[in-house]
Amino acid sequence: MQLIVAVMADNFDYIIVGSGSAGSALAYRLGESGKHRILVLEYGGSDAGPFIQMPAALSYPMNMKRYDWEYLAEPETSLDGRQLVCPRGKVLGGSSSINGMIYVRGNAGDYDHWQDAGALGWSYADVLPYFRRMEHAHGGAAGWRGADGPLHVTRGPRDNPLHDAFVTAATEAGYAAVDDYNGYRQEGFGAADMTVWRGRRWSAANAYLRPALCRGNVKLITGALVENILIDGSSATGVAYWKAGKRHEVMACAEVVLAAGAINSPQIMQRSGIGPGAVLQNAGVDVVLERAGVGTNLQDHLEVYFQIACLQPITLYKHLNPVSKALIGLRWLMFKSGLGASNQFETLGFIRSAAGVAYPDIQFHFLPVAIRYDGTAPAEGHGFQLHVGPMRSKSRGHVKIMDAGIHNPPQIKFNYLSHEDDWVEFRRCIRLSREIIAQPAMVPFRGREIQPGDDQTSDAEIDAFIRANAESAYHPCGTMRMGAVNDPLAVVDPSCKLIGIDRLRVADSSIFPRITNGNLNAPSIMTGEKAADHILGRAALPRANDTPFQHSEWQQTQR
């Protein structure tokens, strides 16, 4: 049977693979002048409908085949052989359309580490102007936040008394209450930012892609399953993709930009013959360029649900019934208001796990209900929970193709908790959580500890709980890391160019040298924003002179 290849007649300057957090931002900025023709290739389809657009319905899209790639990671030795799911957005907006909508820039120390690791020009002073450019923050610290960007960032009402009680308890334990963890000071507890605007999920598709498409010089093709990057000699020339059973080739006059995310970007790169030679050969792919770092350095945030029974019937548990859900949904559909208009993650905290830790390495998400990401609640009824976990695990995993088949998922191996320090940090997460919940402010609400359980106190007991219950926070990154051109494990240089191949760049969370504090949507969008200036040859935004907070006695005290 002869393969028919359709070559698209349209001419495009830039081809962007992926319409997610970074890809949508790229489409917006590359097309901003009107001088360039841009093509965005996306395998997923429409993001219309309440399951995506209603913030409170966040548990649904990440569990729906229509919107999710449904990746399953390899069994984890340190997690009793469990296989964790790895949801990735297969829809307009990518993972920004199925995530928890929690907005965290990361810590200044994260980006200074990037620079120290070889990503010159990506220090905090360099990236802060891009965070400001992309934001339209409704709240937060004046001067630290953007006010007219495409990405609306808001806060929930926090009208459940448990939110204030938890922050008060944290201050009683000796931590700070902060007005804006995305501003001057991250360390402490306070109101959470979310990518919600006028009661709707404000995904990258809503913020960036749709406005870009309205300009007329950006074209979107959905249902496009990318096979590989087309390479002639040492230069990328275009992209091959499948749609409706036919193979198509489309050419880029300027550059191809891979923005398919931490799992799909290395997968596509390896199918294109770029990556570790042994991996490519074992998969039956001809080696175009040996690049050892493609698919390595995989990182994620692991967390546990620390759950407490609530003595008062004030939690969201009372709404976890069909009638209440229907009423919440109806109000949202009619008015875009009520409980449906919030992701319910309205309080966050960041602390240091020990003296000598320079900046926060533990994150808390507070939720006024005891529930899992799949929407199931414990039988105990009313409760509340902390999602808590270490921020900077030393464990590293990989993504690698097992064959050249475009419909076959790659092997995803996180190697969670493979470094002993991870266990030490996780135990501290549990014990520091207990200390906060034990404070006087929580007394009117605090019942028994649902999990781990009040009697689980020893290292061995806590470790057993972690092994059986730890879950991914769904923040994979780092699989095509940015670094110096002479770094054999770097994949892209600080301008996001693929080292060794011309006219090819990568701009998404895969290029992070190390995972940032908190949720990754904001850093991913920032990456697309900054990469666009590199691609267009623009001067970078002027470096910021702002000095963020660092605890003056971090070497001597934990708080």
Image (cartoon, rainbow, N blue to C red):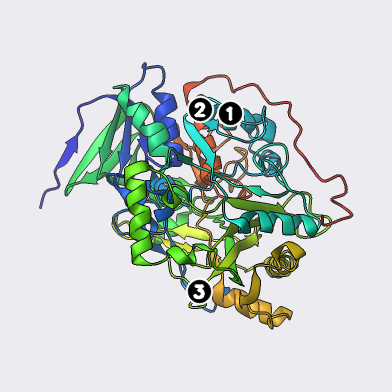
Q: Looking at the image, do the residues carrying marks 3 and 2 touch, with CB atoms under 8 Å apart?
A: no
Spatial separation of the CA atoms under disc 1 and disc 3: 41 Å
Element marked by disc 1? loop
Q: State the residue in front, 219 or 234.
A: 219
- Mark 2–mark 1 Cα distance, whole angstroms, equals 7 Å
Label 2–label 1 contact, CB within 8 A? yes
Question: What residue would you read off at disc 1?
Answer: 146
| Residue at numbered disc 3 | 381
The answer to the question of whether label 1 and label 3 lie on touching residues, with beta carbons closer than 8 A, is no
Residue carrying label 2: 149
Q: Is residue 357 above or below residue 472?
A: above
Q: Position of residue 106 (x, y in %)?
A: 63, 44
Decide if residue 548 is on the left or right side of residue 211. Answer: right
In the image, residue 432 lies at what x, y percent?
74, 65
**Residue at image x 58%, y 29%?**
130
Of 210 and 159, the residue lying toward us? 159
- What is the tally of numbered marks visible in this picture? 3
Badge number at residue 411: none
Q: Amino acid at mark 1?
A: Gly
